[in-house]
Image (spheres, rainbow, N blue to C red):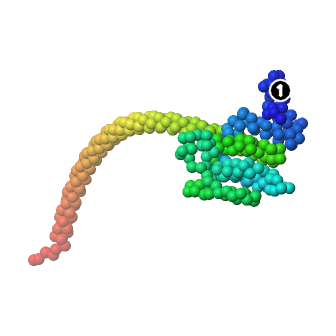
Amino acid sequence: MTANLVYASGSQRTLPHDLQRHITTKYLNKEERIQDAIAKFNSTSGREKFKKNLSLLPPDTRVNLFVNGIYNKFNKLVENTYVIVHGGITMPRYIHQIVRVSLDTIYYGFRLGCSGNPNLRRTQKTPSFTMCLSNTSDMGMKYCPIEGHSELTDNIHVTDFAKLIRILFKVLKSPKFTEERNKILYDFALIVQILATKYTKLKEQKQKDQLAAKEKAQKDKLAAKEKAQKDKLAAKEKAQKDKLAAKEKAQTDKLAAKEKAHKDKLVAKEKAQKDKLAAKEKAQTDKLAAKEKAKQEKINQKRELLEMRMQEKKVKKTKPIIM
């Protein structure tokens, strides 16, 4: 099956993707949909899209996808298919070895892409395996751990991931293996597509949030600057008003003090005049009282003198005549 189901005209002109999606989901059964998806996945454009989708995923997600979606499943596939059936081997030895070596190469942090580059071959380490000729399920092939490559890697390069997929398509092309291979890769590609969409949306949302935060920060900075300018202007206006109010208060206080001093002077003058008038009146009263007193004393003296004379006369009249 080709990567595209229906052509509009010419061998390379296809129907719109949404219409193709409608046809593949509406009129094809699950097996046909898997075949169509795998054909697209294995095309040049499909491989490029796959690499792009993988590059959108975080490293730890790529590692988890590799282990659960590729490594475990294809290891199980080659072990289950490498058995003796009626004296024959279902999976050829070299295919079994290629798959196992390719899987372990990535699992333990080696590079698949260095094999075709002489410069990388000299600088990159390659995995080592021990082999034996037994017909056991693992063929006696075991990976030999070396320093720095004894555990599951924490990062898988996108190019190595893509090359591993091409190797699986190339070596597992026998009809007896393709159905299981296609199911595994179909599920894997579908999960990668879903996660890529998810992380794309997360990335877009993050970019939107960062842009919104940046715009908010710029607005806040501008608002703070405008507020600072307004506060500075308000403070300047307040200082001017306070200075003017202080000046007006000083003038008012000075005028009030001047008016008070003038009033106090008038009051003091009026009091002095009143005190002078009261003193004058008192002096006149005292003089008049003294005059009256003197007059009364003179009258009293005259009265007393008259009484004395009358007393004397009286005494003379009552005194006996001595012969």
What is the x, y in percent for residue 167? Answer: 71, 43
Closer-to-camera residue (104/248): 104
What is the x, y in percent for residue 153? Answer: 62, 52
Q: Residue at x 74, y 51 (%)?
A: 93
The kind of secondary structure element at disc 1 is loop
Q: Residue at x 86, y 40 (%)?
A: 32
Q: State the count of labels.
A: 1
In the rendered image, the residue lying farthest to the bottom is 323
Q: Residue at x 58, y 36 (%)?
A: 215
In the rendered image, the residue lying farthest to the top is 9
Q: Residue at x 23, y 56 (%)?
A: 293
- Residue on which the image places disc 1: 7
Q: Is residue 289 left or right of residue 104?
A: left
What is the x, y in percent for residue 189? Answer: 75, 43
Res 257 visible:
yes
Closer-to-camera residue (250/266): 250
What is the x, y in percent for residue 258? Answer: 32, 38
Res 201 visible:
no
Closer-to-camera residue (208/257): 208
Vertical position of residue 276 compared to residue 72: above or below: above
The quarter in which the N terminus is drawn is top right
Q: Amino acid at mark 1?
A: Tyr
Instruction: Locate residue 319: give its quadrant.
Output: bottom left
